[in-house]
Image (tube, rainbow, N blue to C red):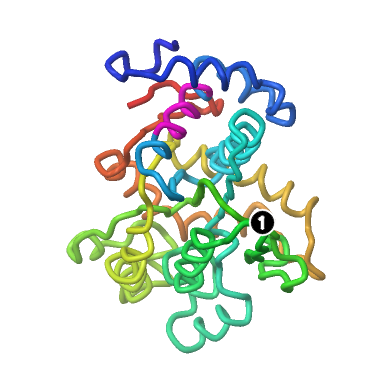
Amino acid sequence: MSSLWPATREQDQRLLKTLLSNRSALRDMPENWMKQWETVWAPVATWVAEQKREIGGVPVIGIQGGQGSGKSTLSRALCSLYREALGWNVVSVSIDDLYLTHAERQRLGQETHPLLVTRGVPGTHDYELGKQVFADLKALEPGAILKLPAFDKASDDRLPEQDWHKVFGPIDLILFEGWCVGCQPVSAEELATPFNELERLEDTDGRWRHRANDMLAGPYRDWFAMIDRLVTMRVPGMQAVLNWRSQQEVENNRNRRGATTRSMDANALARFIQHYERLTCNALRDLKEHADLVLDLNSLHLVKRIE
C-alpha cells in the first residue's frame, strides 16, 4: 500500500488485489498516470468500490477538480476497470455535457448578463436535465437504452440527439465529474470585491458573480445533493489550470464533432479561464472540508498527498 494512502484506513485487501490484477483494463491510460497506478489509483479505485458496496443501490460518486486536473481520465479508468474486474456497468456523466446550448446561452446573455454567453459558471448548465439524467439512470431496467446529452467544446454547443451517448441498463454506479461539482456558495460580502480583471471590467455591478453564487445556493445545491460521495482533485494553482486547459484546447479542436469551430487562441483562453477563477480558488480553499476524499496534485499531474 502506498505511503500516500492514509494508514488508518482499513482497505479490503482482496478487492485491491483483484483490481491490481486487472491492469490490462487500463491499456489506454496516459503513461504518467500509470506511474501511480499501484500507489494511488488502485487504492482510490478500491475506496470508490467500497463506497458503492456501503451505500448500495446505484450511488453517485462526484469527482471535482480544476480544468485539466484529470477528472475525465480517472472516470474513464474506473469505468474500464470496474467493467473488466467486477463486471459492473458504470456510467460517467460529465457536467460539461449538460451545458446549455449555444443559442440558449446567447439568449441568457442578452436577457440577463453578457458574461453568461460563456459556458462555465453555475447557471450555464441545464441542471433540471442533470437531475433527470440521474433519476433515469438509477431507474434504467435491464436491456433498456438511455441517451445522455453530449457537448462539443470546439463548436461550443450541444450535439444533435443522434450523437448523444448511449447507455444500457441496468447501471451499477454513476460517476459525476466536473470542475464545479459539489462547489459551495459563499457570503455576499465575499463577492463584493472583483476577483480578477474580467470581474472588474465586465461585471462592474457584481450581478454575474452574485447570480452564479445564488445558483449554487439554490438549484445546484439540490442537484449536488444527489451526490453520495465526493472526491476532489486539488490543482496546484491557476497557472497549472491555464497550462493544462491550453493542452485541452488542442485536443478539443482535434476531436471536434460539431459542424463549426469556436476554438480559442491564447488570449481568448486566458480570458476564458477568468470565468472559472473565483470558484476554482474557492474550491481549493473550501471543498476539502466537504469532500470525502482529497487528492492533492503537483504541476506534473502526480498525486502528492491523499486525505
The answer to whether residue 43 is magenta is yes
Q: Quadrant of residue 272?
A: bottom right
Q: Position of residue 158 (x, y in %)?
A: 66, 70
Main secondary structure along the magenta-highlighted residues: helix
Q: Is residue 107 visible?
A: yes
Q: Is residue 267 left or right of residue 121?
A: right
Along the line of sight, which residue is nearer the eye, 198 or 43? 43
- Disc tally is 1
Which residue corresponds to the image point at 31% horizontal and 44% vertical from the top-left? 287
Q: Quadrant of residue 223?
A: bottom left
Q: Quadrant of residue 221?
A: bottom left
Q: Secondary structure at mark 1?
A: strand
Give the extent of the magenta segment.
42-50
Q: Position of residue 286 (x, y in %)?
A: 27, 45
Q: Is residue 150 visible?
A: no
The answer to whether residue 287 is magenta is no
